[in-house]
Amino acid sequence: DVKVTQSSRYLVKRTGEKVFLECVQDMDHENMFWYRQDPGLGLRLIYFSYDVKMKEKGDIPEGYSVSREKKERFSLILESASTSQTSMYLCASSYSAGRQGRNSPLHFGNGTRLTVT
Amino acid sequence: GDSVTQMEGPVTLSEEAFLTINCTYTATGYPSLFWYVQYPGEGLQLLLKATKADDKGSNKGFEATYRKETTSFHLEKGSVQVSDSAVYFCALSLYAGNNRKLIWGLGTSLAVNP
């Protein structure tokens, strides 16, 4: 079974802190994604990566950056946390179209609930 | 632009009731369609999918048919159980060149009472 592991289930940080959210997948997936999930807004894509050291902005990248130094690990960084970034963060991964076709499903971690005070 | 619209929740049903969650979409090109489910305290997981018009996806008693003429992908289950209580997300997938674009609905919360 595919496992996507997010390092923290709950996190409380102060405004202005630099925050790292870690995600590791064990299925050799090429693609990795960071979403945030907010009531009434659904899932919004922050960043994604198609390969090691590659990154692409999603729909709401402002205030975030990412790092993918190894294939299995995708980190989301909040450079200076703000209260507006209080949210549930979901990491996901999938095979590339070349390996499993164009409709490879996304596999999600259980989420990190981040509170910024 | 491309979009997915789901019926608003929450939906509350009694056990063994019939379930329909409506999903309609707007898309350029030929999208694939998905239903994902999020159980309490967990991430999303794929429930079913359909990749072309008239395809029917099915899993765990749930079904959805890709209707191009009505641009819909409604989720149905004949007899729900308490364990089906979750949030359900409709999504479409499109490719622009080699780049995959996923568009998500806002989710529909389902509560099933014994």
Image (cartoon, coloured by chain):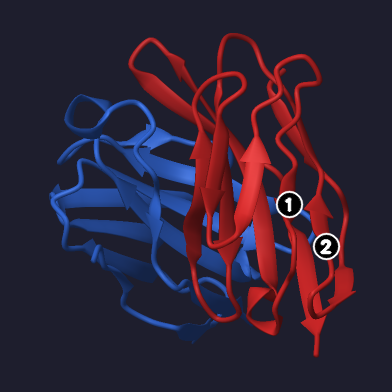
Image height check: is B89 above or below B29? below
Dot 2: element: loop
In this picture, residue A59 sits left or right of residue B78? left
Give the camera-side residue of B78 and B97. Answer: B78
Image height check: is B21 above or below A84? above
* Residue at image mark 2: B18
Q: Position of residue A67 (x, y in %)?
A: 25, 51
Query: At label 1, which amino acid type do we have?
Result: Glu
Query: At label 2, which amino acid type do we have?
Result: Phe
Q: Position of residue B106 (x, y in %)?
A: 74, 50
Tag 1 near tag 2, CB within 8 Å: yes
In this picture, residue B106 sits left or right of residue A57? right
- Asked if both marks, 1 and 2, belong to the same chain, the answer given is yes
Q: Residue drawn at (60%, 60%), measured in percent from left and top?
A: B61
Q: Position of residue A44 (x, y in %)?
A: 60, 47
Give the camera-side residue of A31 and B82. Answer: B82
Which of the 4 quarters of the picture holds residue A101? Answer: top left
Give the camera-side residue of B98 and A57. Answer: B98
Q: Colour of chain A?
A: blue
Dot 1: element: strand
Q: From the rendered image, report the letter of the chain displayed in red.
A: B
Residue B76 is tagged as 1
Q: How many marks?
A: 2
- CA separation, marks 1 and 2? 7 Å
- Asked whether the viewer can see residue B100, the reply is yes
In this picture, residue A84 sits left or right of residue A60? right
Callout 2 crowding tier (Cα within 10 Å): few <14, some 14–19, many ≥20:
few
